[in-house]
Image (tube, grey):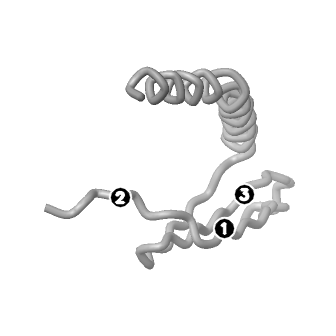
Amino acid sequence: MGSMEAPSLVQARWRVDVTITTSMMQKVLTPVVIMRLELSNGEIKTFELPQSQVHSLRYTLAKMLKDMHYFEKKVAPVSLAKKMNERLVKN
């Protein structure tokens, strides 16, 4: 059975659309981010995010990057040291 690998991101495009007025000529000024993601398996995903979700996504990505940085600085060196120690004990 083949491995079940998730496709990787090939390209990301985004734009901000702002609705200025409705059909009833009411002033709206509602920003929406439209994202288009192209994946390595050829799929293209397009979706819209209202302003509130953009802020939530931005916060989540910032937290994820902070956690990754912590992992790289704290956890990864410990794992590497443990592996090196295990190799020394075997020899």
Left or right of residue 71, residue 22 in this image: right
Q: According to the image, label 3 marks what residue?
A: 33
* Amino acid type, label 2: Glu
Q: Nearer the viewer, residue 50 or 58?
A: 58
Residue 51: x %, y % from top left: 74, 44
Residue 86: x %, y % from top left: 44, 24
Q: According to the image, label 1 marks what residue?
A: 12
Q: Are marks 3 and 1 in contact (CB under 8 Å)?
A: no
Q: Distance of mark 3 from mark 1, alpha carbons?
A: 13 Å
Q: Residue at x 42, y 29 (%)?
A: 91
Quadrant that contains the N terminus: bottom left
Residue 39: x %, y % from top left: 50, 70
From what the image shows, is residue 76 above or below residue 38? above
Q: Residue 60: which quarter of the image?
A: top right
Q: According to the image, label 2 marks what residue?
A: 5
Q: Secondary structure at mark 2?
A: loop
Sequence-wise first label, 2 or 3: 2
- Mark 3 burial class by Cα count in 10 Å: few <14, some 14-19, many 20+: some
Q: Nearer the viewer, residue 16 or 22?
A: 16
Instruction: Kindly report which numbered mark, 1 or 2, lies closer to the viewer in this rendering.
Output: 2
* Amino acid type, label 3: Val
Left or right of residue 20, residue 38 in this image: left
Q: Residue 22: which quarter of the image?
A: bottom right
Left or right of residue 55, residue 20 in this image: right
Sequence-wise first label, 1 or 2: 2
- Mark 1 burial class by Cα count in 10 Å: few <14, some 14-19, many 20+: few
Q: Nearer the viewer, residue 59 or 65?
A: 65
Q: Residue at x 68, y 21 (%)?
A: 74
Q: Residue at x 79, y 53 (%)?
A: 31
From what the image shows, is residue 51 above or below residue 9? above
Q: Secondary structure at mark 1?
A: strand
